Amino acid sequence: MIKFLRKILDANAHRFENNGVLEKLYPLYEAADTILFSTGEVTKSGPHIRDSIDIKRVMILVVIALIPLYIFGAMNVGVQNGIAMGVERTNWEQFWYGFDKIIPIIIIAFITGAFWEILFAVVRRHPISEGFLVTCALIPLVMPASIPLWQVSIATSFGIVIGKEIFGGVGMNIFNPALVARAFLFFTYPGRISGDKVWVIGPDGYSGATALAVPAAEVNQHAVSLLNGVTQFDYSWWNMLVGWIPGSIGETSKLLIIMGAIFLAITKIANWRVMAGSLIGLGVTAYLSNLMAPFSSNTMLSLPAHYHLVMGGFLFGMAFMATEPVTGCHTNQGRWVYGILFGILTVIVRAINPAYPEGTMLAILLLNAFAPLIDWFVIQSNIKRRVARHAQ
Amino acid sequence: MADLNIKKGHNIRITGVPSDEVQIGLKPKTVAIQPTDFRTLRPKILVKEGDTVKIGYPLFHCKSQSNIFFPSPGGGIVTSIQFGPRRVVEKIIIELSETEESDCHDSFHAAEIPTLRKEQILSALLKGNLIPFIRQRPFNKVINPMDTPRDIFISGWNTAPLSVNLDVSLRRRLPQFQAGINVLKKLTTGAVHLSINENTVSNTLLEVDGAEVHTINGPHPAGNVGIQIHHFSPLGLNDLIWTVNAQDVVRIGTFFLTGKYDPTLFVTTGGPGIKKPTHFKTRMGVQLSDLLSEKLNEGKQRIISGDVLTGKTVGKNGHLGFYDSTISVIPEGGDREFLGMLKPGSSSTRYSLTNAFTGFGKMLFSFNTLQNGSERYMVPINAWEDVLPMDILPNALFRAIHVEDIEEMEQLGILECDEEDFALCSFACPSKIDVGKTIRHGLELMEKDG
């Protein structure tokens, strides 16, 4: 079977190579060929031997880290629907219900993403970049399960084309394409991706406020007691950690996200400095906001750090989006600053800005824009150090 | 405790590590010198095919500096002068005669050397055609003997994969090595720095006098002289530092003690493509087939003059490069694995500096020339930074070179860099970018501009 596949690929290679009938589609052939079989390219000069890691492997490992979130997400969609409808289901039924809802979103995201990637690869004559796999895998996870499919499709198009391809593709983009896609929906069709009505698939008009919206909606209260007072959902700390709460498809299970983050940090694909910085930034800012809470009517200020951690998309953004190597900082000191600022900004947007209960997406996009500036300062300090050394 | 403990870097665990046993190589039929081994050199050839030459006889000189001659690695008849594209002289091959003769020059007593004046030393080095053994930083090219370097650096420790163990090659060479150090000391206003490994057992390295000795420890590229300069006495903007390979210090010392050019060289043969990897005592510019006969493994092998990170593919009939002392053999190509990117791999099937494959063993790994991926745009997952033990931002420097911003390149420290120090970055790069090539391009731009 494997030999047969190899034979077919080899036999058809000439059609796609220079002066072949399908020359224009060579990127497509190359992609199929190298996805199925590891590449046979050999080194030409320089280091004659190379490490086994390549971009395909990097990207596929991120996708692997996301798979548990899909499974949990499907399950959770079923569970939340069950609560809303007031029906009893077995675990399998819960899973299949959610699976049925999210599979079309995934398929649409991948088809749209692949379409644009291939189109640009053919027109711009660059190889098909594996990065779109991660973008397309991330997009469904940051959408509510009730999102209309046409919106998924245009969001993905916007994310891939405007967020990435117009800059020249993976490695050249300024903003995280998956977040660009989400931000696009957030500002153009806010009704389907924010508010109380979208997070749970239930009967018409069914309202399920996310955990972050609960303290954001009240004044002069204590956030934790408010959360504990919610009867519709279990907003206890432990349950929010495990993830049986309303939210975007992939963001609810903090436990699985933490496992994914550890996996990516161990394999050195995501940089641990960004993650550590984020946690420090979030913790310190939340602590300071708690100190200010008695002097303000803003309930969000009283939310403790460990609640910030398990609510909303902070951990998801930290593990899979802030650590994105291309759009983040490129220097190690810069990564610390970038991570700390991400934690700080998330809490500030959450606590101070009444319009948006969640600040993760905007914090990351803002920092994407500032990452080159942070790097610039690091580079300048390196240059100054060198000048000072010579002056001695 | 060493003076300097390098943390970043990596010792590639490649199979075919040469044993410390030294075999005496048979006398080769031909030896060669390749003018392309010298950066930016435009040679003027002084011999023609059929000429008879002695060991150390000048074969060509530098067009821009006509007092620098390049010595013949053997005595015999010049059998061929090979040209490459655009009439670039690639190789001058000499068929060795039975009884080789040496060019003879003045010799000195060991005690006499420290009393010599700088002019006497320089004129002896020029007459003996030994200048090419001394290279300068920045740019890592043959020196201009009229310059005075701030310091001279010698690395007494090889860390490159499969390279010569200097403890072996410097055994019982203390008098010559000492003479070489004394000679070099006269050439600089500063010091002669000698970096040795903390665990060296070589008497030559431990007992030598007159050099400023530093001990170092850590993974490759800790033994690269560029890294040592960066840490012990960094290059300033207008500084000039000379470097000499440890085996060539012995050669210079021998020349002063005997008046003769000694082409002896210890080399290693190693790598997964070879049986019984070992050290050889042979000579400069040896034809590789003389050392590799009957020892290659089955299948197509790539034969490299130099180490696997920075060497040049030369083929079995090629000759050893001027500054090389490692011969690496690795199998050419490999199987295309079905769905390779999804397989977890293990320490015996996949080798990676990241932990992206399972297996964290210390096993040796049988590398081949597969690139393990195709070239992509830069995705900075810190792979370069983790193997570069210098206070230099490789990513920023790479970008500055890419847009040919001379000023920024200089600010970011390009002059302290050489491509050999960045070879590990290319090895580890997930985008399969040849970082060293870009560094070289940057240095060429700097040279043109300056």
Image (cartoon, coloured by chain):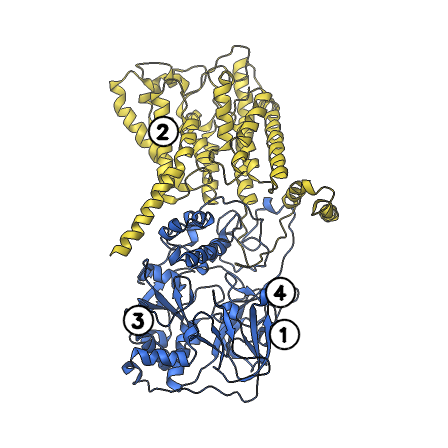
- For label 1, count other residues whose C-alpha is less than 10 Å away and answer few (under 14), some (14-19) or many (20+): few
Using the rendered image, report if marks 1 and 4 lie on a common chain.
Answer: yes
Q: Can marks 3 and 4 be said to lie on one chain? A: yes
Mark 3 and mark 1: Cα distance apart in space: 47 Å
> Which mark is nearer the camera, 3 or 1?
3
Q: Nearer the viewer, residue B315 or A353?
A: B315
Judging depth in this view, the residue of A375 and B389 nearest the camera is A375
CB under 8 Å between callouts 3 and 1? no
Drawn colour of chain A? yellow
Name the disc covering residue B294, or none: 1
Q: Residue B188 carries which label?
A: 3
The answer to whether residue B198 of the structure is visible from this angle is: no
Asked if marks 2 and 4 touch (Cβ < 8 Å), the reply is no
- Residue A345's disc is 2
Q: Is residue B20 left or right of residue B193?
A: right
Same-chain status of marks 1 and 2: no
Residue at the bottom extreme of this rendering: B99
Colour given to chain B in the rendered image: blue
Query: Which numbered disc flags the more N-terminal residue, 3 or 4?
Result: 3
Chain where mark 3 sits: B
Residue B25, position as x, y percentages in the image: 54, 80
Distance from the alpha carbon under mark 2 to that under mark 4: 56 Å
* Badge 4 amino acid: Gln
